Image (cartoon, grey):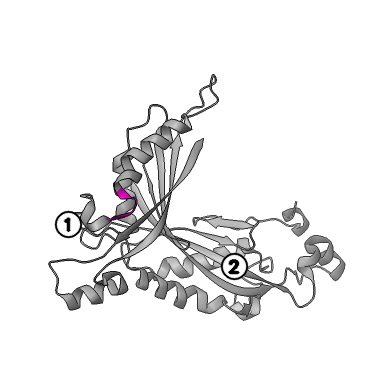
Amino acid sequence: MRVSLTRIYHFSASHRLHSPKLDDAANVALFRECNNQGGHGHNFYLWVTVTGPLDAKTGMIVDLPTLDRIVEEHALKKVDHRFLTAEYLQLPDAADHPEPWISTSENIIRLIYPWIAAALPPGIELVGLRLDETASNRFEYAGGQPMIETSNPLECAL
Amino acid sequence: MLITRVFKFAAAHRYHDPALSDEENQRLFGACNNPYGHGHNYTLEVSVGGEVDPRTGMIINLKDLKTIVETHVIAAYDHRFLNYEVDDFQGTQPTTEQIALAIWRRLDGKFPSGYLARIRLWENDELFADVTA
């Protein structure tokens, strides 16, 4: 039997879906309004699910102020009220990543996951994250999924 | 395949360990240690798994599910002060995790068809605990 705890956080951030390897027309065809100049914003909701042994005396998996502090320092502070580009996030350059990093929520959630996982106290495990970009778009990640290699970026969108 | 029904109850609780001093309790539990307790509108999602009976189209008759949860959980917890009016939390605190576990124990094995797959207990809009087998 497993008990897990989920806490929901939120942050406001902007992004623009744009690939520097494609020309403008290809970017518009691929990303449509998500490619608009200057980007656009979302009120993101981040669901953080953790598990671990249940402390018999406190009745808790983890003390909530501790979890809040970890998520604030290691995730929220990096993204809240920011424009999420590869440059701002200081992501490795093209030498390490054959394709440029695009700020989709699939990629944002995979970026945030190790930030939080590495910062949890010993014995507390990150089960997964859920990122709600809008009321209709939700992304979930439980760790471990590698980047899919493809030579044709247009195939990714299909 | 899971069918989930949502229930609600309002209850009070307090986090307090009588083995610790007042100062230690304050430090450990903060506002959750306030002397007269505080309350929440809890939302309970009970998920039953199993095969769909081809005759009825159901995993479990929802009327049965409702009666079982109301009898074994809601009647005990709703409008109660969980620390004092329920025996489930002796030696521990009625946290979201412990209440969810106590609800699991109250319901596991009680269904005439299907099996208890998940309990999800929301303490507020931003916090819930899941119990799965």
Name the image quarter holding the C terminus of chain B: top left
Tell me the kind of residue under disc 1.
Gly
Tag 2 residue: A44
Q: Mark number for residue A106?
A: none
- Look at discs 1 and 2 and give the one toward the viewer: 1
Residue A102 point in image, percent of width and height: 68, 67
Q: Mark number for residue B91?
A: 1
* View extreme (right): residue: A25
The local secondary structure at tag 2 comes to strand
Label 1: few (<14), some or many (≥20) within 10 Å? few
- The answer to the question of whether label 1 and label 2 lie on touching residues, with beta carbons closer than 8 A, is no
The residue at 85%/70% (across/down) is A24
Q: Nearer the viewer, residue B29 or A4?
A: B29
Q: Which residues are magenta?
A: B77-81
In the rendered image, is residue B128 in sight? Answer: no
Chain letter of the residue carrying label 2:
A
The residue at 43%/65% (across/down) is A117
Residue B76 point in image, percent of width and height: 29, 46
Q: Is residue A51 above or below residue A116?
A: above
Tell me the kind of residue under disc 2.
Phe
The residue at 24%/76% (across/down) is B26
The local secondary structure at tag 1 comes to loop
Left or right placement of residue B103 versus residue A26 in this view: left
Residue A29 point in image, percent of width and height: 84, 61
Left or right placement of residue B13 versus residue B21 in this view: right
- The magenta stretch spans residue B116: no
